[in-house]
Image: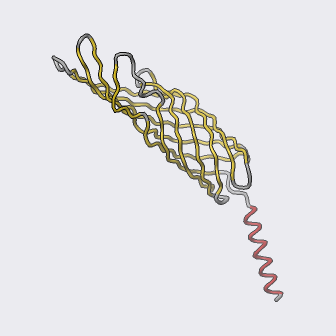
Amino acid sequence: MKKTLIALAIAAATTSAWSQQAPSKFYAGASLGQSKFKGACDSDAGVTLTNCKDSDTAWKIFGGYQITPQLAVEVGYNDFGRISSDASAVVGGSTFAGNAKIDATAFELTGVGSLPLGHQFSLYGKLGVYYAKTESSADIRQTTAPFASASASASDHNSKFTFGAGARYDVTKNIGIRAEWQRYNKVGSSNTGEGDIDVLSIGGLYRF
C-alpha cells in the first residue's frame, strides 16, 4: 500500500512539474485566409470594368519570439494572391478592351501585444512594417480599325505600415490557434496600382 501511495505521489509531482514548465519563447506557424484589395474595382472616368475580382486566397508563414507574456516580435512572409479585371473604354472615337492582373507578396516585421482573458484565451494587436513586391500586367486590344493590340507589365517594391488584431486560443502549452484581421497600408505604386490590402485568416502556431 505504501509503495502504491509513493508511486502515485511521484507521478503527481512529475506531472505537476511538467505542467508548470514554461513553453519555449520561440514559435512558428502558418495561416490561410482571404485577401481583399480595397478599391481595385473602382473604375476611372470613361472606363468600364467587368468580371472584376478584388479578393483571393492569401497565406502566411511566420516565426516569433515571446519577449514577455504580453509582448512578442514576429517576422512573416505573405502571399496575397492575384486580382484581375476586364475593362473597356472609348478613346477618340475608337473602342478598346483589355484585361489586367495584379499579384502581391510581402515580408513583414511586427510587434504583437497580448491581453490574456483567462488561462488559454487572449486577444492581441499587431503593429509593424512590411516590404512588398507588386507585379501587374495588362493586355489591350483595339476593337475598331486598325485593330491594334499591345501588352505591358510592371513590377515595383514599397514599404509601409501594417497593423491588425486577433484572438488566440492555446490548445496546449505548445499549440495555439488564432483568428486574425490585418491591414497592409498602400501596397504598390503608381506604376503597378496602389491600395490597401485587408486579410482575414485562421492559423496555428507551435512553440518549440
Q: Is residue 158 left or right of residue 5?
A: left
Q: Position of residue 27 (x, y in %)?
A: 61, 51
User: Where residue 159 sits: x, y (%)?
Assistant: 53, 28
Residue at (74, 70) in percent of width and height: 15
Quadrant hosting residue 70:
top right
Task: Please say if 140 is above or below 34.
Answer: above
Q: Looking at the image, is 157 positioned above or below residue 174?
A: above
Given residues 159 and 125, the one toward you in this image is 125
Identify the residue at image location x=77%, y=73%. Answer: 12
Question: In this rendering, would 175 be left or right of 81?
Answer: right
Q: Picture quarter containing residue 5? A: bottom right
Question: Which residue corresponds to the image point at 48% horizontal and 42% vertical from the top-left?
Answer: 34
Q: Quadrant of the C terminus?
A: bottom right
Residue 86 coordinates in the image, percent (x, y): 32, 29
Q: Is residue 167 above or below residue 15?
A: above
Residue shown at 23% from the left, 23% from the top: 141
Dividing the picture into quarters, in which one does residue 142 lie? top left
What residue occupies the far top of the structure in this picture?
A: 92
Camera-nearest residue between 54 and 6: 54
